[in-house]
Image: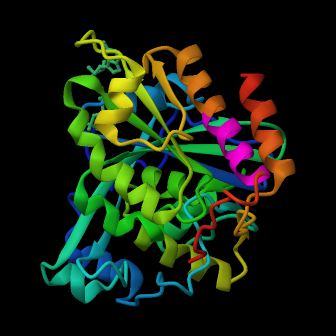
Amino acid sequence: MDSATSETRTPLGASADNGLKIVVVGGFGAGKTTMVRSVSEIRPLNTEETMTQAGEAVDDLSGVRGKTATTVAFDFGRITLDAHNVLYLFGAPGQERFWFLWDRLFSGTLGAVVLVDTRRIDDSWYAIDRLEKHGTPFIVACNDFGGPTFTPQQIREALDLDPHVPLVNCDARSRESSKIVLITLVEHIQALYADPARAPRQELV
Amino acid sequence: MSRPGRDDSPDRLYTLTGGRSRSGPDNPFDLVTLVVAECDPVPGMQSEHAAILRLTERPTAVVEIAAELKLPVSITRILLSDLQAAGRVSARHPRKAAVPDPDILEQVLVGLRNL
Ligand SMILES: Nc1nc2c(ncn2[C@@H]2O[C@H](COP(=O)(O)OP(=O)(O)OP(=O)(O)O)[C@@H](O)[C@H]2O)c(=O)[nH]1
Ligand SMILES: [Mg+2]
């Protein structure tokens, strides 16, 4: 193993005691890592998790030794919110095999940003479907790659989006724009939970 | 960037954890559990354990530890529960609730707006 710690670590304050999660999902090349990097106070780090096809026994080493395990890599960044709260932002693929991990890995997440590249809208269908199934609050952010412009209505229709789900444009390369995306998500979550009729309940794993 | 765990043979991971599988549902370490060292590394300690104690002089999330050690999260969780059982680290778990605490949500918003 090479040097265990990188030289450039930025430690948290000693009073930090509450880690929070927001997940950025989207298709291949949708800008997930870019968005994490834009708002993170650390250089995005990459790690991976392994689990069996059955979606259980994450470290069933007999599963690792046999070849039945699936490995999913994801990157993440960090935002210190105040003396106690630290927000971790995860960039995770929208592909099917990733969702084996969703419950385990991202249980208790505040919510998700679905990043959409409007040149490949179909890439986001699966992620939106899974998020709805899991009852995870989410918003949709269209990343501007200079592709064809669609009206919000066209995008909503293409995604079959619930009218309550916020849809915003963004530039993941911009810190300010990415910040607004996160604020929009958290305001949406607040509104959802403030209305008991609509409040989702996540399964606690 | 080389992906962690990529070069680790299953046998190396097996050796690290003694082949145990304790990172199932009963392992309390969440990705964002903040871990804090309760002691310094001691000579003769397993090198991964020593590395974790150095990393966690200040609170450090499980996922950061995994990334820095270039180990899969599941293996990191096992190492952490060993260290915790030995009283060498303590854990600050995220406050889990079926519904997020409105005060925390407000704190998140304030924090984001102040960025
Ligand atoms: N024009 C434009 N380019 C962007 C934007 N966001 C990201 N990019 C570029 O698109 C490319 C892919 O971005 P990534 O952030 O690596 O995308 P990703 O979703 O992490 O990709 P994978 O992890 O490989 O699925 C990079 O070259 C970025 O610089 C954007 O808002 N506008
Ligand atoms: Mg990426």
Q: Residue at x 49, y 78 (%)?
A: B78
Write down the region rendered in magenta. Answer: A185-194
Relative to A97, residue A148 above or below: above
A132 displayed left or right of B57: left
Q: Residue at x 34, y 28 (%)?
A: A155
Q: Quadrant of the N terminus of chain A?
A: bottom left
Q: Does residue B47 appear in the picture of this structure?
A: no
Predominant secondary structure, magenta span: helix
Q: Does residue B12 appear in the picture of this structure?
A: yes
Name the one closer to the observer, B18 or B103. Answer: B103
Q: Quadrant of residue B7?
A: bottom left
Q: Quadrant of ligand 1?
A: top left
Q: Residue at x 33, y 25 (%)?
A: A154
Q: Residue at x 43, y 64 (%)?
A: A133
Q: Where is residue A128 shown, x and y percent of the image?
A: 38, 49
Residue A188 lies in magenta, yes or no? yes
Q: Where is residue A91 shown, x and y percent of the image?
A: 41, 42
Q: Residue furthest left?
A: A67
